Image: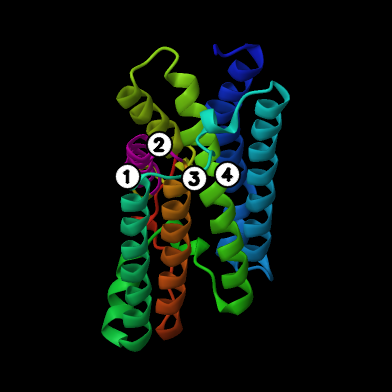
Amino acid sequence: MMPNLGDHLLVALIAAAYPLYFTLDWYRRFRQELETGGADSRSRFYRRSTIELWLLGVAILAWWLWLGRAVTTLGLGNPGGWVFWIGMTIVLAITIGLGHQISVVRNSAEARAQVRKQFRGVPALMIPRGNRERRRWVGLSLTAGFYEEVIYRGFLIWYLTTWLPEAAAVLVSAVVFGCAHLYLGWGTGVLRATVMGAVLGAAYLLTGTLWVPILLHAVVDVTSGLTGSVALEDGEIRLSPQNDASIN
């Protein structure tokens, strides 16, 4: 099953047009809104990001199904086998560990102070404050967990393996995934997302299903935001110029 013109156009959208648009829109509008602390600014950002991921993800799934391609080729078949269950066990252990981390941060002023040191620069602007923002953050995280895996691991790795070995396809897709986070800066955004993308891609190849990286992705996103949010209960994170990452 070779990629066609529609696949090429979708990859161009995923790898170039969407990251560029989102990054420019972040610096043009959303960052300013978040820095000034406008009413409901974070909720609007979460909602906008969720909708955009839905639109892009549904477009890819609709295109895939319209061509009569099997969802198993995209990594969304019925999971099974001992490798899958080992992967799920690891995800469960990570979930428990990250859940415990949130509890520790909530109950320790020292732990909250340490977390606040880790959340510096632009990423600090995205940390949810209050229950309403936390709920919307969870919604965004679950959306990203599913659709970003379909986009960057399922569809993009399938596309790349037409010309590259699987390991190389995972690395290239991880770099593309990292570049989609350019708005967060080169260090905290691109580099960390690239490493995470490589881990998620490896999980996909090893288990043969997207369901393991989908769950792992969602868990990491949900708990990272909630950990930062809990840490803010004991103080505020501020954006300082020396810690800010910029594309300029």
Secondary structure under the numbered disc 2 in the rendered image: loop
Residue 70 spot, x, y in % from top left: 60, 28
- Looking at the image, which residue is at 50% across and 21% down? 159
The residue mark sitting in front, 1 or 3, is 1
Q: In this figure, which residue is indicated by the disc labeled 2?
A: 208
Of mark 1 and mark 2, the one earlier in the sequence is 1
Bin the neighbour count of mark 2 within 10 Å (Cα to Cα): few under 14, some 14-19, many 20 and up.
Answer: many
The residue mark sitting in front, 4 or 2, is 2
Instruction: Kindly report the distance in space between the C-alpha atoms of the residues bearing marks 1 and 3.
Output: 36 Å
Q: In this figure, which residue is indicated by the disc labeled 3?
A: 183
Classify the position of the C terminus by image quarter: top left
Q: In this figure, which residue is indicated by the disc labeled 4?
A: 147
Residue 64 spot, x, y in % from top left: 65, 27
The residue mark sitting in front, 3 or 4, is 4
Which residues, given as a range, are shown in magenta? 189-209
Q: In this figure, which residue is indicated by the disc labeled 1?
A: 83
Q: Quadrant of residue 137?
A: bottom right
Instruction: Kindly report the distance in space between the C-alpha atoms of the residues bearing marks 1 and 2.
Output: 8 Å
| Depicted 241 relative to depicted 51: above or below | below
Secondary structure under the numbered disc 3 in the rendered image: helix
Q: Is residue 139 left or right of residue 101?
A: right
